[in-house]
Image (spheres, rainbow, N blue to C red):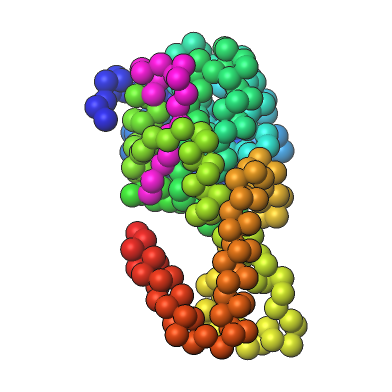
């Protein structure tokens, strides 16, 4: 993807939702764009003080209007069930040339909600950086979080080529490697590779007895690591992508029943083959 926007772009970036991802966007841009001005929405005095003292933002703002009014780029990093309304609000107060993007791990419903507001849709290119942690909050933000990570950009048929170009350039400035999908393709794939596995991780944690927990080793800790994620954020993700996640859970239940039958029938040869197939898939993954 070529870069056609001006060399001094972006001069100001606003982050709406300065947590782990939003804070990391700010820090990565500070690293790669000398002289950039970073604005962060922070409604409490305590958070405004922390964001400026930590160097994550240059200017904290109390309202979306104040935060966006002079920005070249606005990044919405709120929980997924609030992204669309914040994009629409940002579009009302940001300059005509502004790019609005996001970090949400669901896309179809967000894009559809924004598309019914033409003024917002003209500025919005939805995105999802495949990066994060079970930890949350701006205190865990890092300038390298997106380095060499895939960022999925999900334009629509009405997205202008110029705005799409800006979206690619912006996310590449964070250190990410961009690709394109439709919103529906994104949600289908993420249900399989992220959303359903998170629920399975939580399930493994949930069924462990208190008597067994003292015996937990690295394997149990590895498989349950993401279960430590914020329940509020993940409940919103599941709500936004419930159809695709439901389809993946149905396939999971069918495969689980197949595995149970192999064990019940003492079919050790078939069980060995089942494990071998899973091992090969894992070895082929990035």
Q: Position of residue 134 (x, y in %)?
A: 57, 59
Is 148 in front, or is 59? 148
Residue 11 position in % (x across, y down): 40, 24
User: Observer-nearest residue: 263 or 27?
Assistant: 263
Left or right: residue 182 compared with residue 232: left
* Residue drawn at point x = 35 percent, y = 38 percent: 178
What is the quadrant of residue 69 in the picture? top right
Outermost residue toward the right in this view: 210
Rendered position, 100 above or below 215:
above
In the image, what residue occupies the spot 70% across and 78% down?
208
* Image-based side of 277 in relation to 112, left or right: left
- In this rendering, position of residue 223 left or right of residue 163: right
Residue at horizontal 49 percent and vertical 47 percent from the top: 189
Image point (43%, 51%), residue name: 145
Image quarter where the N terminus lies is top left
* 173 lies above or below 162: below
Q: Is residue 52 above or below residue 155?
A: below
* Residue 215 appears in the rendering: yes
Residue 159 within the magenta-colored segment of the rendering: yes
Quadrant of the rendering where the C terminus is positioned:
bottom left
Work out which residue is located at the far left of the displayed protein and give it. 2
Measured from the top left, where is residue 261 in percent x and y?
A: 61, 78
Q: Nearer the viewer, residue 197 or 44?
A: 197
Image quadrant where residue 64 sits: top right
Residue 112, percent across and down? 60, 25
Where residue 220 sits, quadrant-wise, is: bottom right
Foreground pick, 16 / 236: 236
Q: Magenta segment, which residues?
A: 149-164
């Amino acid at each position: 993807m070529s870069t056609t926007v001006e060399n001094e772009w972006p001069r100001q970036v606003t982050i709406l939702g300065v947590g782990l991802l939003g804070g990391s966007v700010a820090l990565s841009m500070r690293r790669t764009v000398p002289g950039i001005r970073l604005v962060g929405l922070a409604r409490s005095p305590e958070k405004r003080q922390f964001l400026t003292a930590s160097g994550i933002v240059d200017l904290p703002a109390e309202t979306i209007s104040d935060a966006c009014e002079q920005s070249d780029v606005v990044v919405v990093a709120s929980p997924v069930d609030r992204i669309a309304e914040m994009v629409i609000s940002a579009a009302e107060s940001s300059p005509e040339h502004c790019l609005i993007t996001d970090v949400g791990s669901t896309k179809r419903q967000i894009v559809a909600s924004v598309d019914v507001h033409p003024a917002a849709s003209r500025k919005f290119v939805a995105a999802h950086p495949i990066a994060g942690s079970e930890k949350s909050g701006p205190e865990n933000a890092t300038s390298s979080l997106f380095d060499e990570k895939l960022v999925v950009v999900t334009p629509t048929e009405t997205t202008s080529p110029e705005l799409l170009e800006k979206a690619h350039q912006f996310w590449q400035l964070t250190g990410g490697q961009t690709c394109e999908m439709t919103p529906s393709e994104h949600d289908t794939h993420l249900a399989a590779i992220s959303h359903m596995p998170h629920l399975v991780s939580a399930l493994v944690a949930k069924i462990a007895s208190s008597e067994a927990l003292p015996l937990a080793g690295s394997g149990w800790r590895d498989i349950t690591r993401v279960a430590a994620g914020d329940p509020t954020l993940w409940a919103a993700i599941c709500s936004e992508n419930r159809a695709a996640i439901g389809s993946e859970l149905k396939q999971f239940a069918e495969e689980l029943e197949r595995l149970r039958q192999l064990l019940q029938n003492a079919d050790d040869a078939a069980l060995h083959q089942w494990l071998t197939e899973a091992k090969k898939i894992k070895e082929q993954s990035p």
